[in-house]
Image (cartoon, helix red, strand yellow):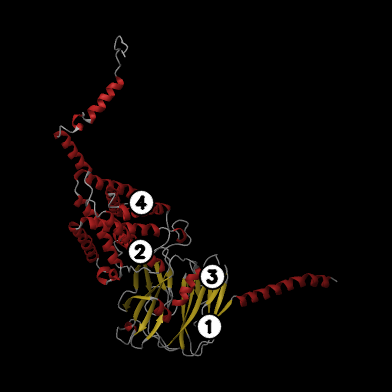
Amino acid sequence: MSHLVRWSLLLPLLLLLLLLVICQVQAQVENRVVFLPGTFQNVSVSQNESVQAVVSRIPPDVAFITLQFHTQHHNATLSYTRVPDLGLSVTAVDAGLLSTLLPGQAALSLFLMSSNRDSVAGTGVILPYSSTDPVPGACNTEFNLDIDPNVYIHYNLYETTIRFAPANLGYERGEDPPPCDESTEPSTRWRLQYDVYQYFLPENDLSERSLFRGIQEVADVHGMVQNGKRVMTLFSSDVSSAVFNSIPGQGVVYSVIVRDPLLNTVASYVPVHTYACSFVSTMDGCQTLGKISTKVFFTITGLAGLFVCFFGHRFFKIELFCMGFSFVAFFSFVAITRTTKLDYDIRLALSAVIGVVGGVLLVMSWWRFGSVMACIVVVGLMLGFLLAATILFTPLGDLDVFRHSDVVFWVTFCCIMVIVPLFFVRWPREGNIITCGVVGGYAVILAINTYIYTSLSYIALNILKRFLNSNFSPAFTDVPFQAIDYAMITVWVVLSVGGMVLQLYRERTRPFFPPSPYIMWLQERERRKTNVLDPSHHFPPLPNRILARARQLTKRSEPAGEHTPLLL
C-alpha cells in the first residue's frame, strides 16, 4: 500500500519533468532558423534567448560565407558558439561573421541573440563566396575577431567615420590563408583595392521597414554597385577609414567592396547604417531633432525672409536690419561656440541679441552718414556668402584639393564672396534686389527645414561645420537629393524670381535708393534758417516750444481786473 502511495506521488512529478523536457526541446526547435544563401530572413529574438542560424546545402565551390544581421537601433550579438566569448562574437546594430569552410562541409551553424534585456527584430542574409574572391577582414589586427568583415562606424554632430580591417586573397577549402604582411608584391593582398559606397535611405523616413528595404537592396556587391554611389577608392597602402558629413535624421548605409584587380573578383563587407542621431535619447533624439528654440528662431527668420524677398528694396531700413542681423548673428554664433561651452539655447539667444545690435548699427550707419554703397557692400557680402556656399555644396566641394587643404577651401570661398559686391558698384539697385530675392527665398527654405528635412539646408550648415570644427575638411559632404529637395529648389527659384521681378517692376520709376533721414533733416533745417518766407522760419525751435508749454502749465494765471460786457 505504501508503494502505491509513493508511486502516486512520484508519477505527477515525473510527468511534469517529462513535459518540461518536451517543452525545452520544442523551444530549441522553434529557435532554429534555416538560412538559404542569398535569401533574406526576418528574425525576432526574444530576451534571454538565442537563435541558431543554420545554413544548409552549401555548394562545394563555396569557400567561405558571411552572415549579416541588421536591426534599426538595438544591438544584436552574433557568435560562433552558443555562449558568446571574446574573439568569437560581435555585438552591433549591423553585425556580421565570416566562416571559412572545410573540405566536404555542406552545413554550418551560428548563433544569434539579444545583447540586452530587450527583444530584437531584424533581417539577416547569408552570402557565399568562392575561393578566388577576396576575404573581407582576413588581415585584421585591430578588432577582436580573427577574421572581421564588419564596418565600424562612429558619428558626432559634424562628421561620420567608418573603419574596417584589411582583406586577404582568397584560398581553397582546407588550405592555409596567404600571409598578410610578408611582402608587398603584386602576388599578395597588397594588390587589393577598396571601393567605399554610400546609399541614402528615403528622406524624412525613420521607419524600420524603410531601413530593411534599403539594406536588402545593397547588402551584396551587385545591389550596392547598382543602387549606391561610389565615393572613393582606397588602396592597400592607405588607411582603411573614411570620413563623411553627418546628416542628423537622414538614414545612410555605408559599405566597402574589396576588389582583386588581377582576378577581377569582388567581395562585400557587412554594410552599416546610421541616422547620426539616437533613437533612445529623450532630448535631441531622432524623433525630436528640432529644438523649440531652433524652430522659433528660423520661423521668424523665414517670415522676415519672405518679406524681404518681395518688399526688401521698398522698405530699405527693414532690409538693412535683416541683412545686418543675419551677418552678425552667424559669425557671433561661430565665435561663441568656439570660445565657450554654453548650452545651445543660450548660444542661440546670445547670437540673436548680438545680431539685433548688428542690424541696428547697420541701419544707424545709413541713417547717420547716408552712405548707400557702404551698406550695399554688406548686402553684397551676404549674396557672395550664399553663392560661394552653394558652389562648394555641389560635387566641386568634394574635390581632393578642397578636402585636404583648408587654406585652398577658404581662399576660394573668400574670393567668390568678395567678387560679388564688386558688381554692386556698377548696378547697386539691381544687385540689392537680386540679393533680396535670393537670400530671402533661402531664409524661407531654412524655415521649412525646421519642420520638413531638406538637404538644401546644408548649403549653409556645411560652412558652419567647417567654421566650428577644425578637422571637418577631410569629410565628404554628400547629401541625398530626392523628391523633397527638387521641390524645395523649385520653391526657392519661384520665390527668388518672383521677388526680383516684382521689385524691379515696382521700383522702375522710383529713385534708386531712399534718401538718408538724417541728411534730409539737416537739409530741412538749413532751408528753414535761410528762407525767411517759409512760415516755419518764424516758429521757435522745438526745445523752446516745449519749455514755453511747460511754463504755461505751471504758471498761476493772474486776474484781469474788471470785466466790461461787450457792446452789441
Mark 1 Cα within 10 Å, few/some/many (few <14, many 20+)? Answer: some
- Mark 1 and mark 2: Cα distance apart in space: 43 Å
- Mark 3 and mark 1: Cα distance apart in space: 19 Å
- Mark 2 and mark 3: Cα distance apart in space: 34 Å
- Disc 3 marks a residue whose amino acid type is Ala
> Could you tell which of marks 2 and 3 lies nearer the N-terminus?
3
* Residue 12 place in picture, x, y as percent: 76, 71
> Could you tell which of marks 3 and 1 lies nearer the N-terminus?
1
Give the residue number, with chain letter if any, for mark 3: 121
Task: Say what secondary structure mark 4 lies in.
Answer: helix
Residue 41 relative to residue 309: left or right: right
Give the residue number, with chain letter if any, for mark 2: 456
> Could you tell which of marks 1 and 2 lies nearer the N-terminus?
1
Mark 4 Cα within 10 Å, few/some/many (few <14, many 20+)? Answer: many
Contact between marks 1 and 2 (CB within 8 A): the answer is no
Front residue (pair 142, 264): 264
Give the residue number, with chain letter if any, for mark 1: 36
- Disc 2 marks a residue whose amino acid type is Leu
- Disc 4 marks a residue whose amino acid type is Leu
Residue lying furthest front in this view? Answer: 568
Mark 2 Cα within 10 Å, few/some/many (few <14, many 20+)? Answer: many
